[in-house]
Image: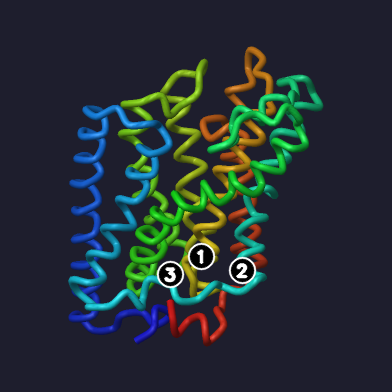
């Protein structure tokens, strides 16, 4: 049975739910354990993020080996094709860039690319905005991809195919998006992973309104390509452009944080628009070769 075929027998449905429950329990336990241990050892922020973001993927690999004795269904063997990878890379630019351009143009926030140099991983500031942007688009993307893959092997490599056996794409996307949102809550509430200014309740609501529907985009891309790599790329591209390029180049005014970033309403709004466009105009029937290997 491929992932495009719904489970029809009680045994098939029970098997999918058991795998889902096992995965969610493992992710919950090891996420909380990792958060506790990382607070004790005070590792560099990038390394701590790497460890945390690989918890979902590690749990997905473990559950796949426990029940399937194979990693074949995680979507790692296929690249997703150039079109799939390019789609993953460009989608975050499509929904994020308009938010920031409007903010810069109307004066709700300033534009200062000189801050790009501070966001480059492993390299010092080259002193030129153009050079810094070049390093972010290359070295920065690889750095983001190495962490995003850890999450995506779990969320979209393992979890999405299990839910697709039980429910349609849009429901799968929303439920996995909700689980993904809940996984972020300890970091939002227990660390500095939020913005300054707006009330934390407002930030959580905006973050939820962005992340939960994003699950549909990721599930759609996973199903269309039969691969987890475009999902890892859309995740890495989002983190790169939103966190390291657009946020870094934005000079905050009194109300900027209410609009921009992962905790403002701008990205929540444009993400919903993108999701609706995919549901209305995206080709929902995956290629046979992709469907057979999801």
Residue at the image position 49 percent from the left and 68 percent from the top? 222
Determine whether label 3 and label 2 are within 8 Å by CB: no
Closer to the camera: disc 3 or disc 2?
2
Closer to the camera: disc 1 or disc 3?
1
Residue at the image position 45 percent from the left and 18 percent from the top? 199
Position of the C terminus, as image quadrant, is: bottom left
Q: Position of residue 131 (x, y in %)?
A: 74, 37
Instruction: Specify the quadrant of the image occupied by residue 285.
Output: bottom right
Q: Position of residue 197 (x, y in %)?
A: 52, 15
Residue at the image position 66 percent from the left and 70 percent from the top? 83
Closer to the camera: disc 2 or disc 1?
1
Mark 1 residue element: helix
Determine whether label 2 and label 1 are within 8 Å by CB: yes
Residue 266 appears left or right of 157: right
Q: Is residue 153 above or below residue 30?
A: below
Instruction: Report which residue position mark 3 lands on.
Output: 168
Q: Which mark is residue 229?
A: 1
Q: Is residue 290 above or below residue 192?
A: below
Q: CA distance from mark 1 to mark 3?
A: 22 Å
Instruction: Specify the quadrant of the image occupied by residue 224.
Output: bottom right
Q: CA distance from mark 3 to mark 2?
A: 21 Å
Going from N to C along the chain, the mark reached first, 1 or 3, is 3
Q: Position of residue 46 (x, y in %)?
A: 43, 37
Instruction: Report which residue position mark 2 lands on.
Output: 84
């Amino acid at each position: 049975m491929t992932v495009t075929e719904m489970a029809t027998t009680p045994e098939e449905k029970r098997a999918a739910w058991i795998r889902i429950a096992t995965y969610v329990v493992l992710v919950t336990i090891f996420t909380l354990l990792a958060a506790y241990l990382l607070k004790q050892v005070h590792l560099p922020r990038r390394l701590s993020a790497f460890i945390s973001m690989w918890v979902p993927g590690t749990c997905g690999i473990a559950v796949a080996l426990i029940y399937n004795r194979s990693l074949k269904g995680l979507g790692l063997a296929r690249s997703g094709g150039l079109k799939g990878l390019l789609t993953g890379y460009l989608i975050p630019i499509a929904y994020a860039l308009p938010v920031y351009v409007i903010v810069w143009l109307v004066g709700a926030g300033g534009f200062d690319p000189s801050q790009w140099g501070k966001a480059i991983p492993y390299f010092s500031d080259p002193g030129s905005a153009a050079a810094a942007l070049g390093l972010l688009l290359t070295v920065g993307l690889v750095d983001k991809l190495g962490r995003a893959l850890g999450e995506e092997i779990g969320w979209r490599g393992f979890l999405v195919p299990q839910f697709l056996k039980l429910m349609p794409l849009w429901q799968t996307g929303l439920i996995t998006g909700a689980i993904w949102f809940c996984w972020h809550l300890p970091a939002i509430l227990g660390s500095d992973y939020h913005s300054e200014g707006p009330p934390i309740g407002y930030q959580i609501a905006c973050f939820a309104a962005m992340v939960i529907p994003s699950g549909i985009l990721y599930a759609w891309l996973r199903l269309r390509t039969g691969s987890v790599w475009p999902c890892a790329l859309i995740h890495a591209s989002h983190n790169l452009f939103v966190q390291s390029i657009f946020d870094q180049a934005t000079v905050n005014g009194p109300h900027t944080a209410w609009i921009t970033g992962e905790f403002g309403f701008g990205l929540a709004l444009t993400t919903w628009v993108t999701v609706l466009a995919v549901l209305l105009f995206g080709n929902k029937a995956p290629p046979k070769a992709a469907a057979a290997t999801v």
